[in-house]
Amino acid sequence: MSELKIPKHIAIIMDGNGRWADKRFLPKKAGHRKGADVLENILRCSNKFGVKYLSAYAFSTENWNRPQDEVNDLMDLLDNYLDRYIEKCDENGLKIKCIGDISKLSDALQKKILKLEALTEKKNGLNFIIALNYGARDEIFRAVKKILNMVLDKKILPNEITKSIFESCLDTKNIPDPDLLIRTGGEMRISNFLLWQCAYTEFYFCDKFWPDFNENDLEDAIKNFSMRQRRFGSR
Ligand code: FPP
């Protein structure tokens, strides 16, 4: 791996949990559970490869439209996941941040998220960004409202608004844009994930279902990224 260009920030759309479970005549919940384990492994591998930021699309603003049972299962899974990460936070060195509008999650989940963020704030391992009730359009909309309130409160004049002030109102404040976005599950779309931040991101689509994604697949994605010539709009 040493000769490869390692992306500083990888964003992942973990698609295919349901189809993975269907193929095995398992409930969808089993697919999400396996998906959560795979995410843990991919975090470890990313850290090993020298990736500094990993963003995972765990629950979108649109996912509320899934059957109530599935939403409940995902919330339970998240609850367990947070507990596990609170327990292990001294061991893995991860710095964890959630993006998205967490105010729509239960009070108990919100408390655990804030606790985990505070507990890992000073860690210097991999930055793990979990997108929860996240939608890029919602994020941009909330950022616009924040700026409008700053103007109304006379903290800033309209002609003083800059791109960097706008970016500081996004949930990803202080997080560099993703270099590589990986989507598993065979679909080739971005599904409202990090729309602003992915302006110059390299996309990598993989047919495997997320629960089957492993270290070799991550390495393949990084190798593929390594061969790309990034010009950011210049020649
Ligand atoms: C898409 O698969 C996946 C999701 C909507 C949820 C992703 C969540 C996890 C991998 C769980 C781990 C994360 C945390 C932090 C709890 P799908 O169900 O749309 O798959 P399908 O397209 O095959 O139906």
Image: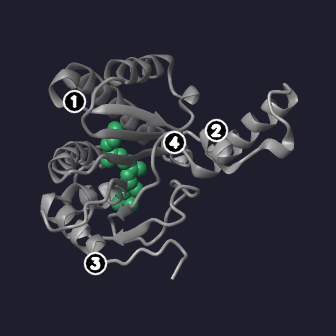
Residue in view at x 56 percent, y 49 percent: 62
Numbered disc total: 4
- Tell which tag, 4 or 3, sits nearer the viewer: 3
Give the residue pinned by disc 3: 227
Q: Is residue 41 above or below residue 18?
A: above
Estimate how packed mark 4 is, as few (under 14), some (14 to 19) or many (20 or more) residues with alpha carbons within 10 Å.
some
Give the residue pinned by disc 2: 169
Residue furthest bottom in the image: 235
Colour setup of the view: one colour
Asked whether 56 or 157 is in front, the reply is: 157
Q: CA distance from mark 3 to mark 1?
A: 30 Å
Residue in view at x 66 percent, y 47 percent: 140
Estimate how packed mark 2 is, as few (under 14), some (14 to 19) or many (20 or more) residues with alpha carbons within 10 Å.
some
* Res 103 → quadrant: top right
Give the residue pinned by disc 1: 93
Dot 3 or dot 2, earlier in sequence: 2
Q: Measuring from the top left, give residue 221's x and y in whole percent.
A: 25, 68
Q: Is residue 173 left or right of residue 221?
A: right
Q: CA distance from mark 2 to mark 4?
A: 8 Å
Q: Is residue 165 left or right of residue 80?
A: right
Q: SS of the residue at dot 1?
A: loop
